[in-house]
Amino acid sequence: MLTSSISICCKRLRLSNNLAVNSAQVQADSHQEYLLKLLELEIEHRENAKYDRLLKSAGFYYLKSFEDFKFDEITLPSSVSPEYLKSLEFLESKTNLVMYGNVGTGKTFLSIALGVEACKQGVVTRFFRTAALVNKLSESKKTGTLPKFLKKLYQADLIILDEWVRAHRHNRSTTTI
């Protein structure tokens, strides 16, 4: 009976029903401790829900983490360390990262691990295979939804482009941007 009343109050206050569910489970020695524990559980619930939303909207094809990545199998520039990447310092300094190498060297794995870590830290992230992004931009232009799509792109703090292919032709200069 109390749980349903608490649930109604949560709805009116625009709080999650998670408070009502946890209200019967929290044990504490005082009213203040009870309230604190309940609020801490709500904060944890909201952070987890935000992380899940960020992961879903990022568009990863699969999830990878730094725990499974072997940094000793790649070569990083002297100015870049695994800790630098894991801490996402490059976002704070607005530094772009370009990863290149042969097929199977871990570029996509590392890119996804960076994106997943960014989502954990509350960073709005978008992941695209480059060709898919070009197709999406073209399709959005044709259907008249390009401004809406661009708005979503501009809201991202981190955009990861995978499978960026640079063509090599004899007797032609190439510029990488």
Image (spheres, helix red, strand yellow):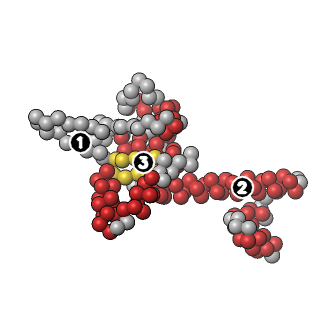
108 relative to 131 in the view: left or right: right
For marks 2 and 1 on the same chain, the one whose residue lies earlier in the sequence? 2
Q: Quadrant of the C terminus?
A: top left
- Tag 2 residue: 41
Asked if the residue at tag 1 contacts the one at tag 2, i.e. Cβ–Cβ closer than 8 Å, the answer is no
For marks 1 and 3 on the same chain, the one whose residue lies earlier in the sequence? 3
Indicate which label's residue lies in the foreground, 2 or 1: 1
- Tag 1 residue: 166
Above or below, comparing residue 5 to residue 44 in the picture: below
- Tag 3 residue: 159
Of residues 23 and 154, the one drawn nearer to the viewer in this rendering: 154
Give the residue furthest to the right.
Answer: 30
Q: Quadrant of the N terminus?
A: bottom right
The amino acid on which the numbered mark 2 sits, given as a three-letter code, is Leu
- The residue at the point 34 percent across, 67 percent down is 144
- The residue at the point 51 percent across, 31 percent down is 83
Residue 17: assigned label: none
Q: Is any atom of residue 59 visible in this view?
A: no
Secondary structure beneath disc 1? loop
Query: Residue 44, image x and y in percent?
Result: 67, 53
